[in-house]
Amino acid sequence: MSAPSHADPAPDITIYTSAICGYCTAAKNFLRSRGLHWREVRIDTDPAQREKMVALAKRTSVPQIFIGGVHVGGYDDMMALHRAGKLESLLAGGA
């Protein structure tokens, strides 16, 4: 009898957002269309989280998207990775 095989879990996705942000909405809609889940961090309601985002991303605009430990960038950056065929491997846990 063999042990059941377990696929590696998908990496965590974190999106830093604010309330009025069309690109944030577009990023979340894209991820939702792929059946993905994420942790949303609102920087407009928590100044400490904004400081953390700037320290991690070296950017002040939203959204800032992280997949696993990798800073993807904003919505346009994520879509460029998708068009280049590189987003899928990142979502599968590859760097």
Image (tube, rainbow, N blue to C red):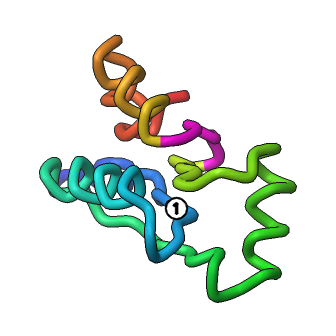
Question: Residue at coordinates 48% horizontally, 29% vertically from top-left?
Answer: 77
Magenta stretch encompasses residue 72: yes
- Is residue 59 left or right of 39 when viewed as pictured? right
Q: Position of residue 41 (x, y in %)?
A: 56, 75
Highlighted range, magenta: 69-74
Q: Position of residue 15 (x, y in %)?
A: 50, 61
Q: Position of residue 4 (x, y in %)?
A: 21, 57
Answer whether residue 4 is visible to the viewer in this image: no
Q: Amino acid at mark 1?
A: Thr
Residue neighbourhood size for the residue with mark 1, other residues' Cα within 10 Å, grouped as few (<14), some (14–19), many (≥20): some
Where, by quadrant of the figure, is residue 9 drawn?
Answer: bottom left
Magenta stretch encompasses residue 76: no
Q: Given the current orientation, which residue lies at the most extreme top position?
A: 84
Question: Residue at coordinates 82% horizontally, 44% vertically from top-left?
Answer: 58
Q: Which residue is mark 1?
A: 14
Between residues 11 and 78, which one lies in front from this camera angle? 78
Question: Residue at coordinates 63% horizontally, 88% vertically from top-left?
Answer: 45
Question: Residue at coordinates 52% horizontally, 54% vertically from top-left?
Answer: 63
